[in-house]
Image (cartoon, rainbow, N blue to C red):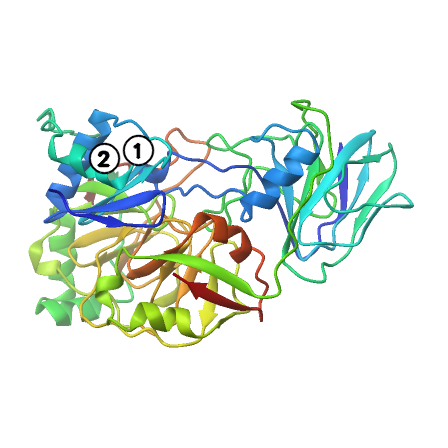
Amino acid sequence: MIEVLAPGPLATVQDLGRAGYAQLGVGRSGAADRRSHALANRIAGNRPTAATVELTLGGFTARFAADAVLALAGAPVPATAGDRVVPLHEPVRIRAGEVLRIRSPRDGLRTYLAVRGGIGGPKVLGSRSADLLAGIVPVPVRRGSVLAVDTEAAADPRAEQGEALPAELVLRILPGPRDGWFGPGAVPGLCADPYEVGRDSNRVGLRLSGRRLDRARPGELPPEGMVPGALQVPPDGQPVLFLADHPVTGGYPVIAVVAEDSLALAAQARPGRAIRFML
Amino acid sequence: MTALLRCGERAVLAETAGLAEAMDLHARLAAARLPGVEELVPAARTVLIRFDPSRTSPDVLAAALDTLPAASGREVSGDLVEIPVTYDGADLAEVAELTGLTPAEVAARHAAAEYTVAFCGFSPGFGYLTGGDPALDVPRLATPRTKVPAGSVAIAEAFTGVYPRELPGGWRILGTTTAVLWDLDRDPPGLLVPGTRVRFG
């Protein structure tokens, strides 16, 4: 068991999310940066379906009630287990009664804490993921919360190489489905200059500001299905990049969708960071 | 060939002529269980098809769509749910003005129809209800509200919806219900699932 002494700005339990509930209006949710979440699980020797704690801007402190093996991946953070340094991407042993102290990342936004065996606790609609848009939080992570540790490890823990966050965040896009709602210059315009990530960004999406994307046709789009990575353009012409907790349907045209391998980078873009799109 | 719009690497959007066609395509796709199709999201004029790119492709899906067998023809007739409404909504007067009716007539016409949940989306438990009086087809608000209270019964573009929780929204609010639209301790958690018939009053 893990007693949360301080959750930091936002900590949630995340796994691969809940697929198959779109009919009820429930999205998939799951780890925002799936690559780092998966990496943390592999280093801890967990199954891909194991839950981790997704930390937003670090600041997480917890006491472990039993011996455990943990791993960190994602935004690089200074961290200690007891009096020992916890490097990123290496399995680390923590002993019963010791405190894990995670500070703030220098760059990036989300750090994943995997514990060998996986984070336990109840599931809702087949997943432990917190979906902040839907208000589904099966396993809360607050000051005083006690997190259970599962016993479903799959392999031996082992260190892995992780990729450092690049200085410039460049996200690959695929035009459509509604690029036809915009003028011919809109997609090149989207890729011309960087966009800045807004302060009101969250797990639902990144609010971006930059070159205005004007529609070439009037009228309203009836609601239609959305995907992670969708760049939805409201009437003000400033795109919103949908992340893990995006709504199942949306009513603004999607000019392009961010490629899957770039979505992990998008989830690490903190407010104020510049991001650039490329075809 | 059915037109498919690319929606990233793992989804395509199939466009249809209207809502009835979208519901029909969804029913046929759901029955066909095409290999590699992971999830379907039916909506007003589209069906989003999420797929596993290692098992299928947009071209394979487009070809398969053209040879889908017709739906079984069994009309899905769901349970009837009655939702009590107090017609005291913030937009009732404006809807009356837009439609040339009195507020009492708007309420009466809204309560007279039997609705069907066409699809869900926007937020868990939010159903898009069709079957309303055509006289009540009004556009969304020009500027959405940042907060619409839970239980608001609202209309926009020939749909009726009930806000399961406090949410931002641009639909025109006709009234309020005390019905619980979304409850995770219930199975299914949503009161309004596709096919459910609904009466207000």
Query: Mark 2 belongs to which amino acid?
Result: Val
B171 over B5 or under it: above or below = below
User: Which amino acid, by three-letter code, is at mark 1?
Assistant: Thr
Left or right: A175, with B76 as reference point: right
Using the image as rendered, state which of residue B5 and residue B125 is in the foreground: B5
Label 2 – label 1 distance at C-alpha = 6 Å
Between A77 and B103, the one nearer to me in the picture:
A77
Does dot 2 land on a helix, a strand or a loop? Answer: helix
**Pointer 2 and pointer 1: residues touching (CB < 8 Å)?**
yes
Picture residue at 37% right of the left edge, 35% below the top: B52
Label for residue B56?
1
Q: Where residue A30 appears, x then y in whole percent?
A: 51, 42
Residue matched to label 2: B60
Q: Is residue A28 left or right of residue B102?
A: right
Q: Quadrant location of residue A157?
A: top right
For residue B32, above or below residue B85: above
Residue at 69%, 43% (x, y): give it.
Answer: A161
In the rendered view, does A5 fall on the left or right side of A246?
right
Q: Residue furthest right?
A: A83
